[in-house]
Image: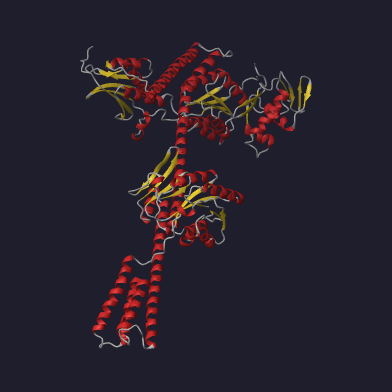
């Protein structure tokens, strides 16, 4: 992966001292600047004061709830928000994402995973000319020419399939929510037709994944959306 | 379709069902009871009910003295289009004396088609009572008074006039007799009026009209006078009878309206309107008893019963009316022809009330289920939070240590290991509490009380805990009677909770004599709990959700469960100057304390 955006300022919000400490130590070891807040109120205060580049946020907080913190931040900030929570219900995830969170990791989590998600979130969406060709072990995508080559042969994608692939590949490693995909590919009046996504993602996987039934590049985040993993390590 | 109690109505029912099917219409079976008939051919009727239910029909009973008129009235009220009757094999003689049911129905039916099913009915008349002769609307007392006036009055008047023959003119006498006839008519109606007129005419003829003491009348004018006399008496009598009938009708209509209004009002108000509707019905129709029965697999059950002689079974009923959902309205007492309409309205009201009740019960059940479901969800959520939070800390620390791209300093490494150690203890306590809780709920906690030294227990409880503690246990405190292991776990939970809310401030643990036993207190100076919420803190996971610190929800519930199991009590009190004091009361032993 590309180098860490060293010096980025991260706000960590969690009422569990141990988690707070573990996250802070890890982030500092990798060159981030870190603020910690045990409550939502403190988080909003620190965010207003230091304008963090990203926020790692627990949902179950004493005082105001994590989802409220997301809404409060989204009122003025576009900094990516990664939710860390023991709540694993689909409703909880959708509520947090709809409120404006960018990613959702359920506890208990591995430190590597959180760090990878954070890196992906901090990467700005690349303009198409910056990286027109993306190469993976299984296929090559030329975003500018709208061409996909697999095993030396061109793969033809329908406009809808291309729309999905394009949006996901431009956000490598990042969660793209169901709503985002529907609205960008189908149109702004869409948002709940998740069955469309399932059907067309199945087509994409059949055309691009080495093993369509065990996808490695185009991953489903149940209840939340999809994620493109450019370099699966397994 | 009209049913009699005669044994072969089955064919009739099946024919009627066919006709109803052809018309796409509903089938109603009707049994007409005479007002004075008691449950007679009930077994046969019960079988008909079953047959009727098989072909998709509904059974009704009505009370009517005139079966034909009653049947047609019922059919019109139900909006029936066809009436199916069994043909009679009665002799012509019975038809003449009792009237033919079929003719009466056809005469009255109007727009309703009448079908007569051919001769299988052995004796249609047997169960249908003869039409009662229409009685006078005047009361018996009034009529006998009228007869007395007619007979005794004529006699007295004749005697009086006979002894004062020369005092009055014939015209005056005639007028006085006329007054008497009118009086008899006004009081007793037609019968006494005619009797009085005839007797008076005879008396006048015999005693006062020349030639005297002979029935012949000389003057034609006198004959005319006598005829007019009788006619006037008859006319007034008829008028009076008619008037009385009208006023009786009006009174009944008024009473009916009143009763119906009461029935409607009782449905509208109240949680369970059934008893009050039955009460109204029972009073209105002056019945011995009314009850609502439901038909279950093992017979009839009483839903509601009103009146001293309320029927406990359909067989005890004078009349039964079928309501929806296998409910039966059973009435006992004497019923009258024209109460059918009122009864039907009551039946409708009861059906509506029953339906409302069923809906209400269903809503309540759904609500209870939803509440139980919500509670279960909240509990699961809380357990999941409490289990995952320490796991998350452990996993975060372990995965940090495992990372290859960073070299941790010895201090940081120790910090991660300490976190893992502490969180593992916390997880262990939580699992212990969960196990204790399920044991408590399963009744599997069997305390073994023995004399226990409180300072030992406190020391053991504190051994695994981190925080600032101050212990104050006097030397002369008696031994408590408790299960040492259970007491230690309760105490550990109370102290853990106190330490968490105190945020680094000292938690005091003290023991005192507290007649008749000992009191063990855990005193914190945290934020405290408002009095109204204190009972709730002992509920498992009362804080709900995943806010606040883990373990609080279960700890206090387990502490109370264990203390209660060994015969103690636990109370939440105010700490003077702020905070919460948890006080455990335990029985003490008289064994002197030894050190």
Residue B459, given in percent of the width and then of the height, sits at 32, 15
Q: Quadrant of residue A203?
A: top right
Residue located 70% across and 29% down the image: A166
B411 vs B311, nearest the viewer? B311
| Count of numbered badges drawn on the protein | 0
**Residue at screen point 33% across, 74% down:** B184
Q: Is residue A89 left or right of residue B491?
A: right
Point out the image quarter for the C terminus of chain B: top left
Looking at the image, residue B218 lies above or below residue A228: below
Q: Quadrant of residue A140?
A: top right
Q: Is residue B349 above or below residue B414?
A: below
Left or right of B131, for residue B209: left
In this orientation, which residue lies closer to the viewer: B500 or B511? Answer: B511
Residue found 29% across the figure and 88% down from its top: B169
Task: Say whether residue A137 is left or right of residue B276.
Answer: right
Display colour scheme:
secondary structure
Q: How far across and how far down the image is residue B343, in percent? A: 43, 54
Q: Nearer the viewer, residue B179 or B58?
A: B179
Quarter assignment of residue B254: bottom left
Horizontal and vertical percent for residue B536?
Answer: 37, 32
Q: Is residue B505 visible?
A: no
State the residue lying farthest toward the right.
A153
Q: Is residue A92 left or right of residue B187?
A: right
Residue B344 x/y as whole percent: 45, 54
Q: Is residue B103 visible?
A: yes
Asked if A65 appears above or below B306 in the picture, the reply is: above
């Amino acid at each position: 992966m590309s180098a860490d955006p060293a010096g980025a300022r991260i706000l960590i919000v969690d009422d569990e001292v141990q988690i707070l400490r573990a996250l802070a130590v890890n982030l500092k070891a990798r060159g981030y600047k870190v603020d910690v807040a045990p409550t939502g109120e403190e988080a909003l205060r620190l965010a207003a004061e230091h304008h963090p580049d990203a926020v790692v946020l627990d949902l179950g907080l004493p005082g105001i709830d994590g989802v409220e913190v997301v809404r409060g931040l989204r009122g003025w900030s576009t900094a990516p928000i990664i939710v860390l929570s023991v709540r694993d219900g689909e409703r909880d995830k959708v509520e947090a994402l709809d409120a404006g969170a960018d990613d959702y990791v359920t506890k208990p989590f591995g430190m590597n995973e959180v760090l990878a998600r954070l890196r992906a979130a901090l990467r700005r969406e690349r303009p198409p000319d910056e990286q027109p060709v993306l190469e993976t072990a299984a296929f090559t995508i030329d975003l500018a020419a709208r061409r996909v080559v697999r095993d030396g042969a061109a793969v033809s994608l329908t406009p809808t399939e291309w729309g999905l692939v394009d949006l996901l590949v431009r956000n490598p490693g990042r969660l793209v929510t169901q709503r985002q995909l529907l609205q960008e590919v189908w149109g702004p009046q869409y948002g709940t037709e998740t069955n469309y996504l399932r059907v067309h993602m199945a087509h994409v996987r059949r055309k691009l994944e080495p093993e369509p039934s065990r996808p490695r590049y185009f991953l489903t985040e149940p209840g939340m959306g999809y994620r493109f993993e450019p370099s699966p390590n397994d | 379709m009209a049913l009699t109690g005669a044994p072969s109505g089955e064919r009739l029912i099946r024919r009627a069902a066919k006709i109803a099917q052809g018309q796409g219409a509903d089938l109603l079976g009707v049994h007409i009871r005479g007002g004075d008939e008691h449950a007679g051919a009930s077994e046969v009727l019960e079988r008909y009910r079953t047959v009727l239910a098989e072909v998709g029909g509904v059974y009704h009973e009505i009370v009517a003295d005139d079966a034909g008129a009653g049947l047609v009235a019922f059919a019109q009220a139900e909006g029936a289009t066809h009436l199916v009757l069994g043909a009679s094999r009665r002799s012509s003689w019975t038809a003449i004396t009792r009237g033919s049911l079929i003719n009466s129905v056809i005469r009255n039916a109007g727009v309703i088609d009448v079908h007569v099913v051919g001769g299988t009915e052995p004796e249609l008349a047997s169960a249908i009572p003869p039409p009662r002769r229409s009685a006078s609307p005047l009361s018996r007392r009034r009529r006998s008074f009228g007869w007395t006036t007619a007979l005794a009055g004529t006699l007295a008047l004749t005697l009086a006039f006979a002894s004062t023959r020369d005092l009055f003119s014939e015209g005056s006498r005639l007028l006085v007799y006329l007054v008497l006839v009118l009086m008899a008519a006004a009081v007793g109606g037609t019968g006494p009026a005619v009797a009085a007129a005839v007797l008076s005419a005879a008396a006048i003829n015999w005693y006062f009209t020349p030639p005297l003491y002979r029935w012949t009348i000389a003057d034609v004018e006198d004959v005319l006078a006598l005829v007019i006399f009788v006619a006037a008496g008859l006319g007034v009598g008829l008028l009076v009878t008619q008037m009385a009938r009208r006023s009786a009708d009006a009174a009944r209509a008024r009473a009916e309206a009143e009763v119906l209004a009461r029935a409607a009002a009782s449905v509208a108000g109240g949680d369970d309107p059934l008893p009050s509707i039955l009460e109204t019905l029972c009073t209105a129709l002056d019945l011995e008893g009314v009850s609502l029965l439901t038909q279950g697999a093992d017979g009839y059950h009483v839903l509601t019963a009103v009146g001293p002689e309320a029927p406990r079974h359909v067989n005890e009923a004078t009349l039964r009316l079928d309501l929806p959902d296998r409910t039966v309205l059973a009435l006992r007492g004497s019923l009258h022809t024209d109460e059918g309409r009122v009864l039907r309205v009551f039946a409708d009201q009861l059906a509506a009330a029953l339906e409302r009740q069923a809906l209400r019960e269903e809503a309540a059940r759904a609500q209870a289920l939803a509440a139980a479901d919500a509670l279960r969800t909240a509990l699961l959520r809380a357990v999941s939070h409490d289990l995952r939070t320490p796991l998350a800390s452990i996993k975060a620390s372990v995965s940090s240590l495992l990372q290859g791209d960073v070299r941790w300093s010895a201090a940081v490494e120790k910090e991660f290991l300490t976190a893992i150690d502490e969180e593992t203890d916390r997880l262990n306590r939580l699992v212990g509490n969960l196990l204790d809780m399920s044991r408590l709920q399963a009744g599997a906690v069997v305390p073994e009380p023995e004399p226990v030294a409180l300072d030992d227990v406190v020391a053991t409880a504190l051994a695994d805990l981190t925080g600032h503690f101050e212990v104050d246990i006097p030397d002369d405190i008696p031994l408590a009677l408790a299960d040492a292991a259970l007491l230690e776990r309760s105490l550990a939970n109370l102290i853990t909770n106190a330490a968490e809310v105190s945020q680094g401030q000292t938690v005091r643990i003290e023991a005192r004599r507290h007649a008749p036993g000992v009191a063990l207190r855990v005193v914190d100076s945290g934020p405290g709990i408002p009095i109204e919420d204190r009972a709730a803190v002992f509920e498992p996971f009362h804080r709900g959700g995943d806010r606040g610190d883990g373990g609080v929800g279960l700890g206090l519930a387990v502490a109370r469960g264990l203390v209660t199991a060994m015969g103690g009590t636990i109370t939440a009190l105010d700490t003077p100057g702020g905070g919460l004091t948890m006080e455990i009361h335990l029985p003490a032993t008289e064994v002197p304390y030894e050190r």
